[in-house]
Image: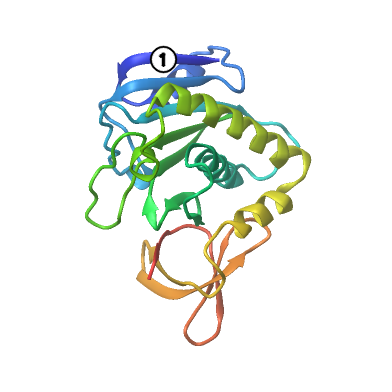
Amino acid sequence: MIEVVEETASTNADLSRRLGAGEGLAEGFWLRAVRQSAGRGRRGRQWSSPEGNLYASTVIALRADDPPVHTLAFVAALAVRDLMALRLRGGTDCQLKWPNDVLVGGAKICGILLERTGDHVIAGIGVNVVSAPRLPDRATTSILSENPADSGDAQAVLGDLASCFAARLVRWRSEGLASTLAEWTRHAHPQGTPLLVAMDEEGMVPGAFAGLDPDGALRLRLADGSLRVVHAGDVSLA
């Protein structure tokens, strides 16, 4: 089910509030806002929300035998990657960057924010459909920039995304985490790619991509040849 509102502060915050109030939102429910006034990115960053792009959140009902909750980040990233294969007709380079960035031709095309509320996870996904906000620290792009023949209809984009997300969620549960991580790695930048990881207490730590740990943590090969496992940090391509 997809519910659409003209404007709200944040679709993630709305779903969190509704779940906290005891509203029975079924898994697969999506809330879309035509406009957001207080969209958020990872680590509390503001997310620009001009009209015409997609701002939506969905609910995942956690089960006792689910893989680790934090690995839903890979599910969301793969779902957006599948969406791009549909909307861009598979003709544009689409690459994944840890933990959940989706890059098209090296430029950011979406934002993903996962938040837990009790026994649910809310996955907020913003996709640049008709325009891309200018960011000081990274290139951005949109579906229409990459494929001018696309309809540019955010509601149609959400219909595709909801199908892609549901399929990836089923595979995450039925095939196990290793399968999801292998698929993510297949679409990520190659091993050996230079990275910079912003760590809260250490600043920028340079290294090279060395794959993923079995739990989805980033393996970073340092200049001295040692291997560091990163569980949290902002990653950029060096």
Q: In which quarter of the image is the C terminus?
A: bottom left
User: On the image, which quarter does residue 125 sit in?
Assistant: top left
Instruction: Judge from the rendering whether residue 75 lies leftward or rightward of residue 93; answer left or right.
Output: right
Instruction: Judge from the rendering whether residue 200 lies leftward or rightward of residue 77; answer left or right.
Output: left
Q: Residue at x 25, y 26 (%)?
A: 37
Q: Vertically, is 175 above or below 224?
A: above
> In front here: 8 or 92?
92
For disc 1, the neighbor class at 10 Å (few under 14, some 14 to 19, many from 20) is few
Q: In which quarter of the image is the N terminus?
A: top right
The answer to whether any part of residue 113 appears in the image is yes
Q: Vertically, is 111 above or below 213?
A: above
Instruction: Judge from the rendering whether residue 166 lies leftward or rightward of residue 222; answer left or right.
Output: right
| SS for callout 1 | strand
User: On the image, which quarter does residue 142 sit in?
Assistant: top left
Identify residue for label 1. 4
Image color mode: rainbow
Estimate the x, y position of residue 226 in percent, counting from the top left. 56, 82
> In front here: 171 or 14?
171
> In front here: 8 or 102?
102
Q: Residue at x 65, y 45 (%)?
A: 68
Estimate the x, y position of residue 81 in percent, counting from the top left. 53, 45
Estimate the x, y position of residue 14 in percent, counting from the top left. 40, 21
Q: Residue at x 36, y 34 (%)?
A: 129
Estimate the x, y position of residue 106 in percent, counting from the top left. 39, 58
Q: How many labels does the image show?
A: 1
Amino acid identity at mark 1: Val
Q: Residue at x 55, y 59 (%)?
A: 188
User: On the image, which quarter does residue 187 sit in?
Assistant: bottom right
The answer to whether any part of residue 66 appears in the image is no
Q: Residue furthest front?
A: 149
